[in-house]
Amino acid sequence: MIKNILMITPGEYPPDIRIKKEIQTLLNMGKRVNILTANLKDRKRIDDFKGARIFRIKYIPWRIFGFIFGKLINHPFPLNPIWLYYIAKASLESNAEALHVHDLPLVLPAIFIGKVLGIPVVFDSHENYPEYLEFLDQPKSYFNFLFNNPRFYKVIQKIILKLINDVIVVIPQMGERYLKNNKLKIHIIPNYCSRDFFNKGEKIAYKVGKPLKLAYLGGLDPSRGLFELLGIMKEIKELPVELHIAGSGVSYQKLRDISISDGLKVNFYGYLEENEVIRFLSNCHIGVIPHPKTAQGNNSNPNKLSEYACFMPIISRRLSSIEKIFDKNDMGYLFDYKEGLISLIKHILENPDILYKKRVNARNFAKNHLFEDIAEKVFSKLYD
């Protein structure tokens, strides 16, 4: 039985929602959880957070005499020797019995350390990472060409899938893509909401009124369809509709600038802690998932789907990963193009009462699909 797990994440922890849910589930199962993370804000190298111990890599200022030392050191490039060193160091310091790696960039060095130490490695794939990079619309630079190149990560992904045994994915479609020409054990843990998060939506009084308040919760980058959503808000700016956006990302300032210059009824809240997310969702009427129909969108399961469902119905792009859920649960509306979303919004404005039944259905979906119920079964197979 494995009791001591080191999670490895290329981002800075906290605040990743999925990682939080996984850690809490493992802690509830009696496991000891440590996590290795980046260090962008000169935080303590060893820290504690809600029952888990955090190991951070050494902090280096982002730029020193104009050179990007900190950016290079923190970047989770698969061949970055700094990350290789810290994976080994954190593994030894935490007495790790298994390495649980979130997303693609750091899986390869983790496999190497796992082989040296004789401990298993689990690849927890949140994203279709190469496809995610393709749609980020990154600025052309030598740095991005060398370290954020989707073609490079496609090669790395092929190598990893030949070397790893256990892969966690968020939906079956993602697992099917990984299984092509690979012998893997695929485990599915969708991005469902936690039991605690669902319960916090229990006593919220849901009342639809004007203006109709649309909610977007999540990352702000070009892969999310938000620029098209602002274009739609421009076309319906005379209607009693507001868009409320909570989250952070590379497109934050550009989205704000467009909203201000076009005089749109769009409010930005930045990154919110969980208690603030509860208030944010409680004050809106319908959640929006505008992600474009890409390989990434069609083969992912955004956290926001279940988080919205705890509080409100949903309008989503007709993604293959979401369409079956909506067909089965009648928890909102699907659209293909901007004209479809505009028509849906006008229809809701004319018939606001239709949202109440869909809100009940959304809550029932969330109640019947809780994160812990699935994650515990998967983790029992991997670590018991």
Image: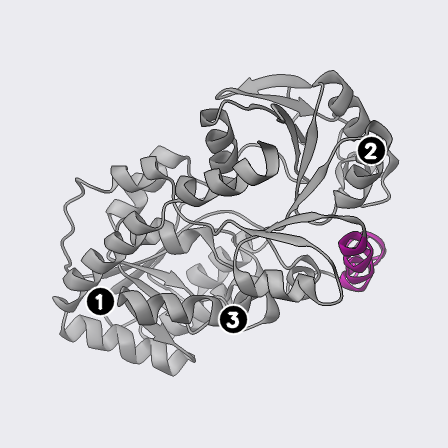
Which of the two marks, 3 or 2, is nearer to us in this view?
A: 2
Please tell me in which quadrant of the rendered image residue 34 appears: top right
Q: Could you tell me which residue is drawn at 83 percent across and 55 percent down?
A: 159
Q: Is residue 168 magenta?
A: no
Give 102 or 179, whichever is nearer the viewer. 179
**Relative to 287, 252 lies left or right:** right
Is 158 part of what is drawn in magenta?
Answer: yes
Say whether marks 3 and 2 touch (CB < 8 Å).
no
Nearer to us: label 3 or label 1? 3
> Which sits in the foreground, 237 or 173?
173
Residue 231 at x, y percent in the picture: 44, 72
Task: Please name the residue that numbered disc 1 is placed on.
Answer: 240
Q: CA distance from mark 3 to mark 2?
A: 37 Å
Which element carries disc 1, helix, strand or loop? loop
User: Could you say where residue 153 lies in the image, as x and y percent from the top left?
Assistant: 78, 58
Part of the protein shown in magenta? 140-162
| SS of the residue under disc 2 | helix
* Label 1: few (<14), some (14–19) or many (≥20) C-alpha neighbours in 10 Å: some
Q: Tell which circle, 2 or 1, labels the residue nearer the N-terminal end.
A: 2
- Whether residue 247 is visible, yes or no, is yes
Q: Earlier in the sequence, mark 3 or mark 2?
A: 2
Instruction: Say whether residue 101 is left or right of residue 242.
Output: right
Q: In the picture provided, is 260 more to the left or to the right than 210?
A: right
